Structures are given as structure tokens and as C-alpha cells.
Amino acid sequence: MTDTKSSDTKSAGVRSTGASRPARGRPGSARPVIICWLVTRGLLFGVAAYLMASTGASLTQVLTHWDVEHYQAIARHGYADPLDVAFFPGLPLLMAGLGKLGLPIAVGTAVAAQLASGLAAWALYRIGGAPMACLWLLAPMTLFTAVPYTEPFFCAAAFWAWERGLATRWTQAGALAALGCTLRISGLFLIAALGIMALTRRGRPFAHKVKDCCWLLLPAAVLVGYVIFLHQLTGSWTAWYSAQGEGWQRNLSTPWAALQQTLPLTAESYWPGRPEVPIMFRFEIVSVALGYLTAAWCLLRRRWAEFTWVAINVLVLSCSGWFMSVNRAVLLWFPLFGLLGVLFSWRPKSSGGRSAWTVLRILLLSADLALICWWGYLFGTGGWSS
């Protein structure tokens, strides 16, 4: 029975990320993932504690910046601000529920985010093994898996939907994708990628593929329901897109036009007194490049579902007027971390080369941990953090 299941999952694309799926039940096989989760959570909590001690700010104040303010406003007052319709209702509903428990909304949601990030890492461990899950947790922008943003919750729902799709549990995959669709527009791209997964599965009768795809009507219904809700609220069928354009200058463009709009923002002279902003916009450009490279890698290896998932995400973000919030979106592109796992698992043939490669990886890890702390500091102080 074990051999059959292993064969089925392999043909379904479980190994399509470039990392072997771990053997279930192997003692300690998930230990690196647990360590990475604990280390990254500890680092970010340490940054928050430092900010509270040095500035006198409360934990709620450290956590409540940028989009968190919008989510909290929706949780408390509904869509009173016309621009707030740019934010999906899933996270505000969760915040409203957690607020009834007596905890400050931001703190309660941050605690839930830690649990969600652990669930997301667990799904990645099942999809692509410990390297993929560890590298995802160690992403420089992992801050957004620990604060009251949609990323940890969406990743948990989307990654488990993907894992359930690979296991041909399409009822569960559809339900999890529906949950993801309450959180952000990326749920639409998830539906498309899961549909490609179902249709390109080898050895499965076409009628069964169609039946599998039918479960994706559930998340599609969630998105349609939100559009209808916004139409009743605003009288517009394009309320979400209009709010994105009016509030965040996200308007349809070409990738090269968006790049031209972003490049001036990388100059320090454009942001006097705010040195972190040009650095962050440089990262945005790098993130877009990584997205296209990952999509190309998936395409060359005929990993159609993964290609669809990454390509749609990066194409939409790079055609939105300018490159913004792409750094956070990298957390959704799990095939990237499979590719990085392949690169970091490379071993030179010579002993000297192996020693040099080990030293380089240690230096990269040290720089990465420092970058995680820097990103956490920026967010906690209200600096521009994508």
C-alpha cells in the first residue's frame, strides 16, 4: 500500500518542486522545519520586544501599521471607507471574532498568524520536504508570516489546498481554496492553478478530471459572492479594481511600463530622510525577476500547475502600474523555494570547494537572519516595508 501511494503521488507531481517528499513517520525528519519556525518566530519577537523596551510602545502599537489599520477598521466598522473594499473580508472577520475573546485585535491575530505559518510550513514539508519548508520560513520577508496580514492565513489555506489536490482529495482542496478566496485576490489564481493540476494529472480518466475540477466551483462561488456583495454596497461591478487604482495606483499596464515607473523610486534622492524606501523598491524589482525566473524554471520542466500559479501571480503584479508588494507575494510562490532547495543542496566535487560552499552558505544564512530582523524593525517602527 505504501509503494502504491508513493507511486501515485510522484506521478501527481509531489516531487515536481525539485525536492523529495519526506517519508512519513520518519522520527525527527521534520526537526529542521520546527527549528526554523522557532528561530524565525523568536527573532521577530525579539525585535518586537526591543522596540517596546526602547520606544515605550505597546505590542499592539508595534503590530498595528500599514494594512493592519485597514483590516482593523473593517473588523470594527465594516466597509465604511470606500477604499477599504480593496481588502477581502476574510481577515477582518477573523479579527472581529478574535476581538470577542478579550485580546487586543492585533495581538490575537498575530498569535493566530504564528499558528497559520506553522500550518503553511507543514503543508510545504508534505509537498516538497524539509528544504522547501525551511527556506520558506527563512525568507527575508518572513515578517509577513508573523503579523496581522493575510499572507500566513492565505498560505496555510492555499498550500494545504495544493497538498490535498496532489493527494486527489479534491473535496478538501476545494474547501481550502474557498477559504483562501475569502482572504485575497490570489485565490482566483489558485483556482486556475488547481484546475491545471487536475486536468494534467496522468493516468486519471478524463471524466474524473472533470469531476475534480467541479470542486473548484466552490472557491469560484466565494469570489462571485464577494463581487455581488460589493455591487450591492457600492453599485459598481468593478469596485475592488477601482479601489486598488484609486488608493494604491494599481492600474493595468505592461511589465516594462511598470518597471519604468518603479526605477525612479529606487533613487535615494527621491526619498530624502527615508533611506529604507529606495532599498525596498530595489527588492521589489528583484522579486519580480525571481518570479519570472521561477515561472520559466517550472515551464522548462513542464510543471504546468506550478508554472500557472507563479506565472499568473507575477504577471498580474508586474502589470499593475508599478512594482509594489511583490516582496510579500514571494511568500506565495512556493516553487521558488523548491528551486532554491535544489540550488543549496548542490555539492562541489572537491573537498576545498565543499568547504568554501559551506562557508558561503553560513554567510548567506547570517545575512538572511540579519535581513529578517531589519525587515521586522522597519515594520515595527512604521517604516516602508512593502
Image (spheres, rainbow, N blue to C red):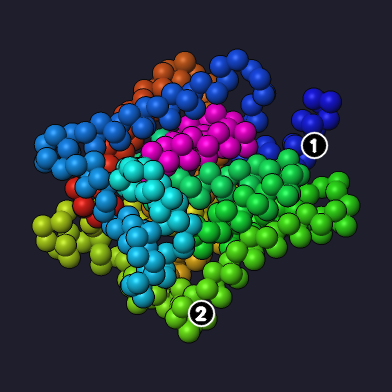
Residue 261 x %, y %: 32, 71
Q: Which residues are magenta?
A: 109-137
Taking the spot 67% from the left edge, 24% from the top edge, the residue there is 24
Q: In this view of the protein, which residue sits in the foreground, 270 or 1?
A: 1
Contact (Cβ within 8 Å) of mark 1 with mark 2: no
Tell me which label, 1 or 2, sits earlier in the chain: 1
Residue 96 x %, y %: 40, 54
| Residue 206 placement: quadrant | bottom right
Taking the spot 51% from the left edge, 63% from the top edge, the residue there is 185
Disc 1 is placed on an element classified as: helix
Residue indicated by mark 1: 8
Position of 271 compared to 74: left or right?
left
Q: Which mark is residue 261?
A: none
Residue 382 x %, y %: 21, 52
- Dot 1 amino acid type: Asp
Q: Is residue 118 magenta?
A: yes
Residue indicated by mark 2: 232
- The quadrant of the rendering that contains the N terminus is top right
Asked whether residue 210 is in view, the answer is yes
Q: Looking at the picture, does residue 55 appear above or below residue 315?
A: above
